[in-house]
Amino acid sequence: MIRVLIVEDDPMVAKINRNYIESVDGFIIVSIATNYIEAINILKNNNIDLVLLDVYLPKGDGISILKEIRKKQLKCDVIMVTASAEIQKIDSALRLGVFDY
């Protein structure tokens, strides 16, 4: 089973992501975090294989979460799922090793 964390502050987008992940065999939603602090706590206390990560969040941003994942050498893939089209954010995410954007 691939354990998934969704990090998304928009309830509608989080629900869409949840519904999609739940429809794919072999994937399970561990949790949905709506801000930076929740995401970091979930990552610390759970074995997560995949993070669907938004860029813009309350109390921090997705790039900061990605930096923490790399700093702590957590073994999980990250897919950025965001409406952000800022080249600097995209470049930062790619340099930090996101699996897809």
Image: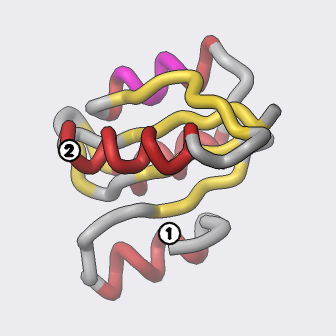
Q: Residue 79 appears in which quarter of the rendering?
A: bottom right
* Neighbours of disc 1 within 10 Å: few (<14), some (14-19), many (20+): many
Q: Residue 46 appears in which quarter of the rendering?
A: top right
Q: Is residue 40 magenta?
A: yes
The three-letter code of the residue at mark 1 reads: Ala
- Label 1 residue SS: helix
Give the foreground label among 1 and 2. 2
**Disc number placed over residue 24 in the picture, else none:** none
Residue shown at the point (37%, 28%) measured from the top left: 33
Residue shown at the point (61%, 55%) measured from the top left: 78
Q: Position of residue 10 (x, y in %)?
A: 19, 43
The three-letter code of the residue at mark 2 reads: Met
**Disc number placed over residue 12 in the picture, else none:** 2
Residue shown at the point (23%, 54%) measured from the top left: 56
Gap in angstroms between the C-alphas marked 1 and 2: 24 Å
Residue farthest bottom in this picture: 87
Q: Position of residue 24 (x, y in %)?
A: 66, 48
**Closer to the camera in the image, 33 or 19:** 19
Q: Position of residue 88 (x, y in %)?
A: 34, 81
- Label 2 residue SS: helix
- 2 in relation to 93, above or below: above
**Disc number placed over residue 93 in the picture, else none:** 1
- The secondary structure that most of the magenta stretch takes on is helix
The reply to whether residue 51 is visible in this rendering is yes
**Closer to the camera in the image, 60 or 30:** 30
Q: Which residues are magenta?
A: 38-42
**Closer to the camera in the image, 81 or 62:** 81
The reply to whether residue 73 is visible in this rendering is no
Q: Is residue 22 magenta?
A: no
